[in-house]
Image (cartoon, rainbow, N blue to C red):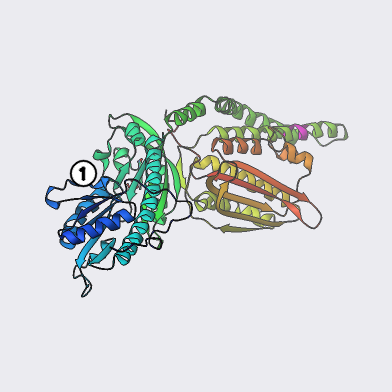
Amino acid sequence: MGQIDTSAATPVEPGHAERPTPQVAGIMVRDTANRRLLQTIAASLDLQSVVLELAEFDPDRLADFELIIADEEKALRLRPLITAQLIEKEQIRPALVAVVPAPIAAVPPDEEADSFDAVLALPDNPSVLSAQLGVALYAHRAFARRYRSALEELNLNRNIFRSVTSGISIANAQLPDMPLMYVNPAFEAMTGYSLEEVEGKNCRFLQNGETDQPGLTLIREALSKQRETVAVLKNYRKDGRLFWNELALSPIRNRDGELTHIVGIQMDVTERVELETALRESEKLAAVGRLASAISHEINNPLEAVMNLVYLMDQVLPESEQNTEVRSYIRQADEELKRMKLITAQALRFSKQSHGPEAVTCEDLLSPIIEIYGPRFKNYNVTVELRNRTDQHIVCMVSEIRQVLTNLITNSVHAMHAGGGRLLVRTREAMDTRNERRGIAITIADTGVGMDSATMTNIYKAFFTTKGLQGTGLGLWISAEIVARHHGHLDVRSSRASQRHGTVFRLFLPYQGAAGEDPAKA
Ligand SMILES: Cc1cc2nc3c(=O)[nH]c(=O)nc-3n(C[C@H](O)[C@H](O)[C@H](O)COP(=O)(O)O)c2cc1C
């Protein structure tokens, strides 16, 4: 047998000089001459060779071989075993080389013949055979390296899924009703349901039939628009215990952009929601609010009486020189009493809590205000433009947020009432850059006189007002408190420049600014 030149057949990839183990070739070839030839070629490729019999072959031993060279009919029977090993055991399969009698007359009839790593036609020139086998081995080793690193990455991801403390759930978005196909151990621990129990079911079973939740409006909307969202839902564990679930949903798409899966991340936020609920109930502001409400109620009637008396005094006081001073005192007293009336009315309004969190759009929030204040805008020569760029729902205490918006809008109108102007109300989806929370932004821009820096630093302080006797100085202070309770924020920019004067308030509210039980019902 002539010398075999294998140099062209065994190229080495840069950086991958090490060969994977085992370097053993299993040979299942009946013809003795062919078998010997293959053993010699295997040796020339630094492979140890072992002669195998298919009938006695144990599939569990597949992992012991880097390469199996078999007569075609045996190779065909080995192939499903090798594929099963690849899938079930996630092992690197041996390369499978089929031996056919030379010359190859035509392409093998089996339509899957190309799943062999190589087909050798025997007998043939040893150096040609060696080159063919070397190329097959090279390709197989490259595949094995890629497969091993993909497997390592897969295992890493699996370990992450298994070890994270948040629940992870994956739903098949291509099947009707989006059934779950995977949940991680943290989901099982959080809910008490095992993967086997939830597989194939829609995750709504955690709601125990409580389908009328504000957070679900966000979930349904996000699923129908195939987009991300976060919402807090009231859920129940398998043992019936309630927990608050902050659910983040993200759509997964294939290369063609089709939605294939939805990933859900579940966080048990029961403690946070309970704390918020308790805080809302017990927080100082609420106590102040209730106290203010009680006092306002008590004050209202005597106040009305005193105002009437002052009015009568003014009426009955005879017109005379010496009464001028008295009349001016009466008028001042009347102004102060009107201011007191305003304060009591506002305190009453503030202490009146919303019924509970509701899912509403910007349109729902703004339309009634713009309708109610329409005549006043006309009187003050103010044109109003509403640019509503989102129909996204948010969950909030509706009457409280309306109170904030009313306050901002009436402030703007007041700032313009001397000469009229333009009020622009814009809404759009936005993100809180401080914590990447998504929500909506409502901008209220006026062409009023603008504020100086001293006013800007004081506007959120209680009882600070620029409206003299007309204002109470409570509006923005209360607004800021309401916005903070909704985890939102209120920003202001203002200019008094002669050409470009005006003020812009920007109210940001997260999609779910209010959650939990209605404190009024607790
Ligand atoms: C991946 C995924 C995870 C979900 N996880 C929860 C969950 O933990 N709790 C829950 O109440 N709803 C969960 N849902 C939402 C419900 O499955 C369902 O979409 C929701 O109730 C709105 O649909 P429906 O009105 O048909 O019930 C999940 C949805 C998906 C797609």
Q: Farthest left residue?
A: 55
Position of residue 403 in the picture relative to residue 457 (left or right): left
Query: Which quadrant, please, contains the N terminus?
Result: bottom left
Q: Is residue 432 above or below residue 311?
A: below
Give the labeled residue for mark 1.
60
Position of residue 128 in the picture relative to residue 384 (left or right): left
* Residue situated in front as seen by the camera: 370 or 26: 26
Query: Which quadrant, please, contains the C terminus?
Result: top left
Q: Is residue 325 above or below residue 106?
A: above
Q: Is residue 312 visible?
A: no
* Residue situated in front as seen by the camera: 60 or 99: 99
In the rendered image, residue 416, in percent from the top left (x then y), is placed at 72, 52
Q: Indicate the amino acid at tag 1.
A: Asp
Position of residue 259 in the picture relative to residue 370 (left or right): left
In the rendered image, residue 424, in percent from the top left (x then y), is placed at 64, 56
Local secondary structure at mark 1: helix
In the rendered image, residue 391, in percent from the top left (x then y), is placed at 48, 55
In the rendered image, residue 392, in percent from the top left (x then y), is placed at 48, 52
Q: Is residue 183 above or below residue 425?
A: above
Position of residue 408 in the picture relative to residue 281 (left or right): right
Q: Residue at x 34, y 63 (%)?
A: 131
Q: Main secondary structure of the magenta part?
A: helix
Pointer 1 local density, CA inside 10 Å: few below 14, some 14–19, many at least 20: few
Range of magenta residues: 330-334
Q: Is residue 72 above or below residue 241?
A: below
- Taking the magenta stretch, the answer to whether it contains residue 332 is yes
* Residue situated in front as seen by the camera: 485 or 9: 9
Ligand 1 is found in which quarter of the picture?
top left
